Image (cartoon, rainbow, N blue to C red):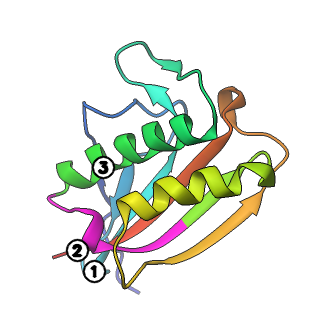
Amino acid sequence: MMSMARQSVFASTAPKPIGPYSQAATAPGLGVLFLSGQTPIDVATGELVDGDAEEQTRRVFHNLEQVLAEAGLGWDDVVKVNVYLTSMADFEAMNSVYRDIFNEPFPARTTVGVAELPLNARVEIELTAALR
């Protein structure tokens, strides 16, 4: 079986990964870009943004948008979203921001409650986008 060389995307305007992973990755012929989960880190300070779930979700989407833009993509290219919340009580706050970001037809989405996220974030979101 022939190996496909992994290609990564790095946006200096998004937070640097806090572990051994790329902000986004693909491989030739896949046709999609996988964006690693982003938390609400302020790229200028490297610190978690204080605030409620809505404010943190806005920062997460801002960070994801930077990575998409670096790859020449935008919100309309997103086909799948995975959302991780430390409290399902934050679902409506996250959903209100989500509605501001995406238009119909909406991407497929999974939202799950988790016990904990890096740096005690309230929300983490990862995306899959179609390459042009």
Residue range corresponding to the magenta coloring: 72-81
Q: Amino acid at mark 3?
A: Glu
Q: Position of residue 9 (x, y in %)?
A: 27, 49
Which residue is disc 3 drawn over?
65
Query: How many angstroms separate mark 3 from mark 1 (CA)?
Result: 19 Å
What is the three-letter code of the residue carrying label 2? Leu
Estimate the spatial distance between the alpha carbons at disc 1 and disc 2, rounded to whole Å.
5 Å
Q: Quadrant of the C terminus?
A: bottom left
* Residue drawn at point x = 19 percent, y = 48 percent: 70
Looking at the picture, tell me which residue is in the foreground, 7 or 112. 112
If the image is split into quadrants, where does the N terminus sit? Answer: bottom left
Q: Is residue 3 visible?
A: yes
Give how far across and how far down residue 87 sits, in percent: 80, 47
Q: Secondary structure at mark 3?
A: helix
In the rendered image, which residue does mark 1 sit on? Answer: 31
Would residue 39 be seen by someone viewing this image from the given angle? no
As drawn, the label of residue 131 is 2
Q: Residues within 10 Å of mark 2 (few under 14, many from 20)?
A: some
The quadrant where residue 116 appears: top right
Among the two numbered marks 3 and 2 on one chain, the one whose residue lies closer to the N terminus: 3
**Residue 78, magenta (yes or no):** yes
Please name whichever residue, 3 or 126, is drawn nearer the observer in this view of the structure.
126
